[in-house]
Amino acid sequence: MNKQKPRIPSGTQCLNCGSSISAQFCPECGQKNKDYRLTFKDLFSDFLEELLDVDSRVLRSLRLLFTSPGFLTSEYVKGRRVSYLPPVRLYLVASVLFFLSLTLSTLVPDVQNNEFFKELSETGDIDNALESALESKQKSLSNDGTISANSGLVPVDPDSSQSGMTVSFGEGQYDVNQSDFLSTFSDNFAKMMFLLLPVAALQLKVLYWRRKKLYIEHLVFSLHVHAFIFSILILTVVLDHKFTMWLVIFASLIYLFLAMKNFYAQSYSKTTSKMILLLISYGLTILLVMTLTLVVTAVGLVMGNPG
């Protein structure tokens, strides 16, 4: 098979950036030095090359994220970055997948009560089956009483024609669609969590101020740890069980301890004490942010639906 060879004549210029090159790749932009006359063969080979390269980086990064706590942070700080996904992209992928699954869980009918499949088998109408299942889920959430009246959010009578939730401010009450509230809260909390990353990095900077690490190094560490936590939190959505939640909490604590131990390279006792201080300070911060997000979400929906 006659493969196209890169042309490497002396004094040639890169077709992408115009820099002088005499090797297989441009030293400035990295583009391959070859004849770029368009053919279907070249287009398909470029596609496969990029696809396989991206997949290898994703798989390698995910494998090391789960199996070697703190390793990706150390590699990034040392400048070894081409072989792995950037920390921000890794965090965004994990967080987006988690909050997307959380949002979908409020819309997809509950499989355990089989309302969707029961209605579908009886009527054969998927729209009616989905509507019936969602109504059943809203009623069950209202009857559970999981929304406290003290928080200003009270469930509407399931026998009424209301949308599923009432937001109370002072003497006023406003009807809010429950799915809209959960979806908006999820979106807002995702944004707030992203803003919390610098706070977590600052807390790590204070805890490890003698290690003489740059603030950005703590931020990268925070990105990787949050990426792992969001990734396994998806299990709590897929497997809706208390045991799953406790398993995720336990795994997150072990991961955080190992990541701090490996990256900051301190003794077990110092790592344990600093981890406890971090959990207390960051836990209080998350509690404050969740409360603020709850209020902002409720106010936003009320302002958007004054009736």
Image (cartoon, helix red, strand yellow):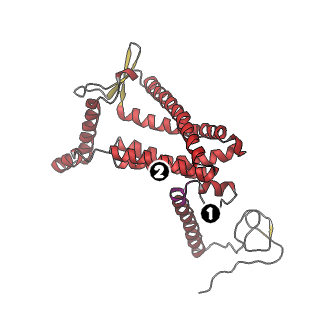
In the displayed image of the protein, which residue is found farthest to the right?
11
Per the rendered image, the range of residues in magenta is: 64-69
Residue name at image x 22 percent, y 49 percent:
117
Q: Sequence-wise, which precedes: disc 2 or disc 1?
A: 1
Give the side of residue 233 with respect to residue 83, left or right. left
Residue underneath mark 2: 231
Q: Nearer the viewer, residue 286 or 129?
A: 286
**Circles 2, 1 touching at the beta carbon (< 8 Å):** no
Expressed as whole percent of the image width and height from the top left, the position of residue 89 reads 58, 51
On-image quarter of the N terminus: bottom right
Helix, strand, or loop for circle 1? loop
The answer to whether 31 is drawn above or below residue 198 in the figure is below
Q: Which mark is residue 83?
A: 1
Image x and y of residue 20, in percent: 81, 68
* Identity of the residue drawn at 36% across and 44% down: 105
Label 2 sits on what residue type?
Answer: Ser
Q: Is residue 52 above or below residue 10?
A: above
The local crowd at label 1, few if under 14, some if 14 to 19, many if 20 or more residues have their Cα within 10 Å, is: some
Query: Residue 230, relative to residue 5: is it above or below?
Result: above
The amino acid type, in three-letter code, at marker 1 is Ser
